Amino acid sequence: MKVLSIVRFKPKPNHLEDVIKELRSHNQRCRRQFNQQHFLSEVDGEIYLVKISPSIEKISEDQEVSLAHLDTIRPRLEEWSDEEQHTRSISGMLIDE
């Protein structure tokens, strides 16, 4: 079953375009490497990354790559809270497509 994930990022002032550029590049790699669909949206200075993975196994494979990429953009992101740190995310099984 496919998995839908939504990740929110809040770039620091003057870093919105840089973060979007980095996420676009990362998305291209993940589309090829993990056969995922990736979408980006910007709303009021926040970036939403939406991805659809073909299976839960692909999410596990993607996690290491995505966390390494997050480390490269982390200095340009604001923390949401001590617990959430630099991303707000949620994932679940895709029940309608």
Image (cartoon, grey):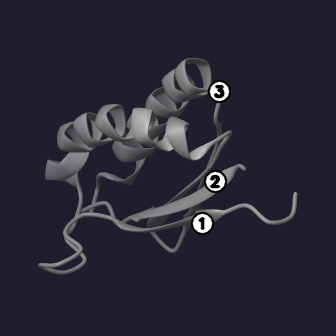
Q: In the image, 2: left or right of 32?
A: right
> Depth check: 31 or 55 in front?
55
Identified at 29% across, 56% down, the residue is 14
Q: Amino acid at mark 3?
A: Asn
Q: Mark 3 touching mark 2, by CB under 8 A? A: no
Identified at 27% across, 44% down, the residue is 70
Q: Mark 2 touching mark 1, by CB under 8 A? A: yes
Q: Which residue carries the number 2 mark?
A: 3
Q: Along the polypeptide, which appears first: circle 1 or circle 3?
A: 3
- Badge 3 marks a residue whose secondary structure is loop
Q: Mark 1 touching mark 3, by CB under 8 A? A: no
Q: Which residue carries the number 3 mark?
A: 35
Q: Amino acid at mark 2?
A: Val
Q: CA distance from mark 3 to mark 2?
A: 12 Å
Q: Amino acid at mark 1?
A: Gly
**Local crowd at mark 2 within 10 Å, few (<14), some, or many (≥20)?**
some
Q: Along the polypeptide, which appears first: circle 2 or circle 1?
A: 2
Q: Which residue carries the number 1 mark?
A: 92
- Badge 1 marks a residue whose secondary structure is strand
Residue 73, position in %: x, y? Answer: 24, 43
**Local crowd at mark 1 within 10 Å, few (<14), some, or many (≥20)?**
few
Q: In the image, 1: left or right of 3?
A: right
Q: Is residue 81 above or below residue 5?
A: below
Identified at 30% across, 51% down, the residue is 15
**Local crowd at mark 3 within 10 Å, few (<14), some, or many (≥20)?**
some
Residue 55, position in %: x, y? Answer: 63, 42
- Seen as rendered, the residue at the extreme right is 97
Quadrant, the C terminus: bottom right
Nearest-to-viewer mark from 1 and 3: 1
Residue 79, position in %: x, y? Answer: 19, 71
Q: CA distance from mark 1 to mark 3?
A: 18 Å
Q: Is residue 7 above or below residue 54?
A: below
